[in-house]
Image (tube, rainbow, N blue to C red):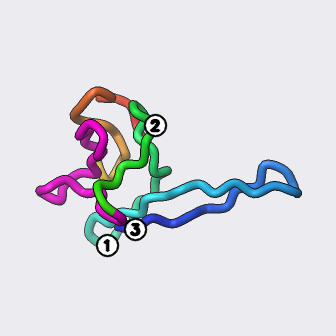
């Protein structure tokens, strides 16, 4: 897992950095914006640390919400049913 920055242009004169998470499950990589849909805070516990203890889910450091790597869907915590 790692954080990357995507530059998105709002207009030709301005760029906005968007922090991303890229997580792999097997040979497939999945990318999401690094922002919890509940707390609107970055997910990582420490730099580049996003995974739950069992390495099965992306986990929010703020309140422990669990997100499926393959879909970004929250399956545990206060934002169940919302997605990254």
Mark 1 and mark 3: span between their CA atoms?
A: 16 Å
Across and down, in percent, residue 11 comes to 84, 50
The secondary structure type at the circle numbered 2 is: loop
Which numbered disc flags the more N-terminal residue, 2 or 1? 1
Q: Is residue 11 left or right of residue 5?
A: right
Residue closer to the observer: 40 or 11: 40
Classed neighbour count for the residue bearing mark 1: other residues with Cα under 10 Å, few (<14), some (14–19), many (≥20)? few
Which numbered marker is on residue 40? Answer: 2
Task: Specify the principal SS of the magenta part.
Answer: loop
Query: Furthest residue to the left?
Result: 54
Query: Furthest residue to the right?
Result: 12
Mark 2 and mark 3: span between their CA atoms?
A: 19 Å
Q: Residue tagged by mark 3?
A: 2
* Quadrant of the image containing the N terminus: bottom left
Start-end of magenta stretch = 47-67
Residue 50 falls inside the magenta stretch: yes
Across and down, in percent, residue 7 comes to 67, 61
Residue closer to the observer: 23 or 49: 49
Name the residue rendered at 49%, 50% in the picture. 33
Residue closer to the observer: 70 or 74: 74
Which numbered disc flags the more N-terminal residue, 2 or 3? 3
The secondary structure type at the circle numbered 1 is: loop
Classed neighbour count for the residue bearing mark 2: other residues with Cα under 10 Å, few (<14), some (14–19), many (≥20)? few
Name the residue rendered at 87%, 56% in the picture. 12
Which numbered marker is on residue 27? Answer: 1
């Amino acid at each position: 897992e790692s954080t990357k920055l995507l530059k998105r242009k709002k207009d030709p004169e301005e760029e906005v950095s968007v922090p991303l998470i890229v997580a792999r499950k097997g040979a497939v990589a999945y990318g999401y914006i690094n922002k919890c849909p509940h707390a609107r805070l970055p997910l990582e516990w420490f730099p580049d640390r996003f995974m739950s203890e069992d390495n099965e889910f992306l986990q929010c450091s703020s309140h422990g919400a669990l997100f499926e790597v393959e879909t970004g869907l929250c399956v545990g915590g206060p934002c169940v049913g919302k997605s990254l």
